[in-house]
Image (spheres, helix red, strand yellow):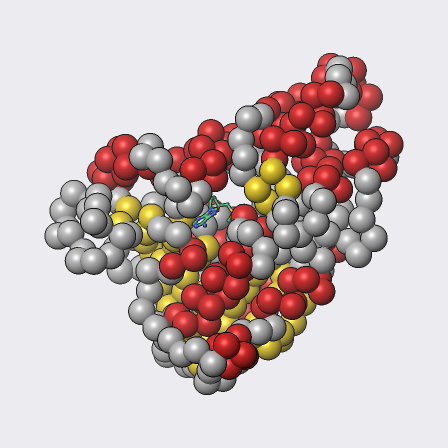
Amino acid sequence: MPVYLGSTQRAPRRRPYSRVDYAGLERIGQTDRRPRNDMPDTMSYWNSFAESFRALGPPLRPSREDIRSMEEAASAWAAGHPGQRLHALLLGVTPEIAGMRWPEPSSLMAVDSSVAMAKALWPGNIPGRRWLVCGDWRGLPREERSCDMVVGDGSINCLRYPDGYRALAAGVHRVLRDDGFLVLRCYLRPELQESPEDVMERMGEFPSFHHFKFCLLMAMQPDVHEGIAVHRVHQFWASRKVEEEALAARTGWERPSIRTIEFYRGTNTVHTFPTLGELRAVLLEFFDEISLTKPSYPLGERCPTLVLKPLPGKCRYRNQRGGSR
Ligand SMILES: C[S@@+](CC[C@H](N)C(=O)[O-])C[C@H]1O[C@@H](n2cnc3c(N)ncnc32)[C@H](O)[C@@H]1O
């Protein structure tokens, strides 16, 4: 049964998603506490993480340079569609994307499964222009061919490989118009994988604890199919018994940033870090790659932004299986 969570609108029929408004947030929070078989730990991880999320920086958050790549992709579409409204869909609640320079006219719908993240980060709905829906990217709450742009920052790395990636890609392909496009900043593992010990050894080289943690996550992933359950990274870190004060003094890292590893404790949230080849193996079933931009900040080579266009007509994935929508 769909649960309607807003306060002034009628319940949408047969749609397990809810447009979020601030009057409805508390009630949405209550529904989030129900166990969900498909992603119980994802919820608890993001919910506990939400308050501290703002403190993160690149590479875990998009930089001005990343946002510029997204703005350029949106402007290019607008230049080719003079006077037309750009209908955009955001995978998550990334405030830098919500607040980027959008062409006129445009509208943005954001989809995120965590009410806590929405409460902590979403800059607010603007009637007719920007709104948030509580839902899962593996079943995007949009009509077929209703979007011109889908954009996400690190979103695909929250899903399991390859099924979650494929579900997202198929859904995005479904909601995009033929001349629409997908913009994804992705976290990619290098071809030559480091060991956790390698990362520990070069700890002093990282500009921040977040850069170190980012490489440790990738180094600890056994393979992309298994991904990395973040509690394992916490266990590994705890087993090394690194003294926080001495580490902060030695590296210049901020102590609150070092403590963010505590959010990984006891949660089974899994992140997946594909190589570029592994990422392309799924995405190119559905899309043509238009561009890949590597930002200039430290570890930027692991955080490219890809712009992709849907393959025309039936995508290769559906052709391979002979299935139709
Ligand atoms: C977009 S990702 C990565 C964060 C990103 N780097 C940023 O700066 O915003 C984080 C968000 O994904 C959401 N999320 C994770 N898995 C999801 C799913 N399957 N469906 C919808 N939202 C999901 C989490 O709730 C969280 O708000």
Residue reaching furthest bottom?
313
Where does the image place residue 316, in percent across and percent down from the top left?
54, 79
- Which corner quadrant holds the C terminus? bottom left
**Residue at horizontal 67 percent and vertical 32 percent from the top:** 233
Where does the image place residue 32, in percent across and percent down from the top left?
33, 37
The answer to whether residue 260 shows anywhere in this view is no
* In this picture, residue 139 sits left or right of residue 13: right
Where does the image place residue 17, in percent across and percent down from the top left?
28, 52
Q: Does 282 appear above or below 158?
A: below
* In this picture, residue 219 sits left or right of residue 29: right
**Residue at horizontal 58 percent and vertical 25 percent from the top:** 265
* In this picture, residue 102 sits left or right of residue 243: left
Foreground residue, 153 or 80? 153
Identify the image quadrant of residue 257: top right
Where does the image place residue 215, in percent across and percent down from the top left?
74, 41
The answer to whether residue 208 shows anywhere in this view is yes
